[in-house]
Amino acid sequence: MLNTFFHQLREKEGAQQFVRFCVNGVISAAIHYGIYFLLQLWIDVNIAYTAGYLISFVYNFMATNYYTFHTAPTWKNFIGFAGSHGVNYLLHIVLFNVFLYLGVHRLMAPPLVMGVAMLVQFTILRQVFSRWGKKKTDRESS
């Protein structure tokens, strides 16, 4: 998987997509963490983490289409995006609980989880959007 990631970055478009992916990811992570930070004061940390993840998912889907991969939202993109995020969520929640178990403070665990999961998510989403994504320019000329 890491070999595929580095191969994608060697391509100019792959490198540009990765930069846009990172910008979008920072914004999405800020939404996720902000909601988690507020909710964890009143509810279980796993529920707070999940609520933040779901809310940031909505923003992330639209931004990933229009900004990161320059595609129009489609049901195929949504299904692929939701599928990749289902895998990503499982990775997140497992890592989150492992970090908590290891004694990482509950406010420090989410950034660590997000950093680890980013590389996996980019590789999955690039495959989804490059196979099923319809370029905006293709749509506009139709």
Image (spheres, rainbow, N blue to C red):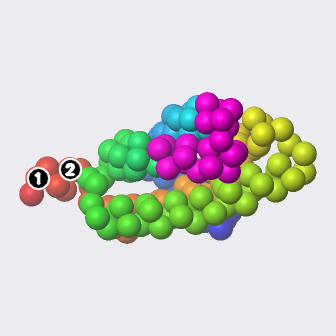
Q: Position of residue 17 (x, y in %)?
A: 46, 47
Given residues 93 and 88, the one toward you in this image is 93
How many marks overall?
2
In the rendering, which numbered label is found on residue 137? 2
Q: Relative to 44, is 55 on the left or the right? A: left
- Secondary structure at badge 1 equals helix
* Residue identified by numbered label 1: 141
Q: Residues within 10 Å of mark 1 (few under 14, many from 20)?
A: few
Q: Is residue 17 visible?
A: no
133 relative to 104, above or below: below
Residue type highlighted by circle 2: Thr
Identify the image quadrant of the N terminus.
Answer: bottom right
The residue sitting at the right extreme is: 103
Q: Relative to 25, is 40 on the left or the right? A: right
Q: Relative to 90, is 28 on the left or the right? A: left
Q: Position of residue 6 (x, y in %)?
A: 63, 57
Q: Position of residue 19 (x, y in %)?
A: 52, 40
- Secondary structure at badge 2 equals helix
Q: Assess whether residue 80 is covered by the magenta stretch.
A: no
Disc 2 + disc 1, Cβ < 8 Å? yes
Place residue 138 in its image quadrant.
Answer: bottom left
Magenta-drawn segment = 37-56
Residue type highlighted by circle 1: Ser
Q: Position of residue 76 (x, y in %)?
A: 32, 67
Mark 2–mark 1 Cα distance, whole angstroms, equals 6 Å
In the rendering, which numbered label is found on residue 99? none
Given residues 4 and 117, the one toward you in this image is 117
The residue sitting at the left extreme is: 142
Question: What residue do we see at 47% from left, 59% from top?
Answer: 126
Place residue 97 in its image quadrant.
Answer: bottom right
